[in-house]
Image (spheres, rainbow, N blue to C red):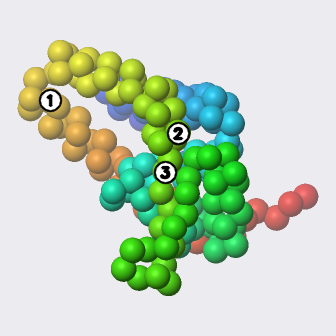
Amino acid sequence: MRPKSTEPAQVELSKALEFYHGTVEDLARELIRLLGVNETDRRALEIVLLGDGKSTTPGLLAERLGLTAAGATVLLNRLEKQGYITRSLHPTDRRRVIVVATDLTARRIEELIAPLVDESFEMMLSWYEPGELELIAGFLTRVGELQRIHRQRLRDMDPYPRR
């Protein structure tokens, strides 16, 4: 771990990032509770809903979530049983399976997340100038990219041995 900087701006940035990450985790935990899923299932639903055309494939889900094919199948079985996803054959390549979020999923996520998205967008537009919004968007994009890189580093590591 790097030593903490004593520069006031860097200290404030560090505190703000820690606060932000904590609130994201708290929000995810409440979504999990309300949807009746676990964290991996919640993330899978997010990937499906944000995917092209609101669908994805089991293989892409497995890769994004760091699961085996068997693990992805178990996850999809669970989500299908809860009515959150459906699976069907790809329309042009019958060897491939497509995972689609159901209307139930879209409706529940809309009910739970839309107020946050709407309020966030309105707040950002009222508090910041266009140039500042570009700077914020660039920062968030770069932080997301760094987190993806670090996630891959962690995936490439062996777990700590159990005691």
Q: Look at 65% across and 72% down and name the residue there.
A: 68
In the image: residue 128, left or right of residue 59: left
In the image: residue 108, left or right of residue 143: right
In the image: residue 82, left or right of residue 86: right
Mark earlier in primary sequence (3, 1): 3
Which residue is denoted by mark 2 in the rendering? 104
Which residue is denoted by mark 1 in the rendering? 132
Q: Residue 73 at x, y = what percent?
A: 66, 67
Near-viewer residue (82 or 21) = 82
Task: Choose mark 2 or mark 1, whichever is in front.
Answer: 2
Residue 105 got which mark? none
Task: Choose mark 3 or mark 1, whichever is in front.
Answer: 3
How far apart marks 3 and 2 lie (CA) works out to: 8 Å
Q: Residue 117 at x, y = what percent?
A: 35, 27
- What amino acid is found at the position of numbered circle 3 in the picture? Ala
Mark 3 crowd level (few <14, some 14–19, many ≥20, 10 Å Cα): many
- What amino acid is found at the position of numbered circle 1 in the picture? Glu
Which residue is denoted by mark 3 in the rendering? 101
Inspect this view and state whether residue 157 appears: no
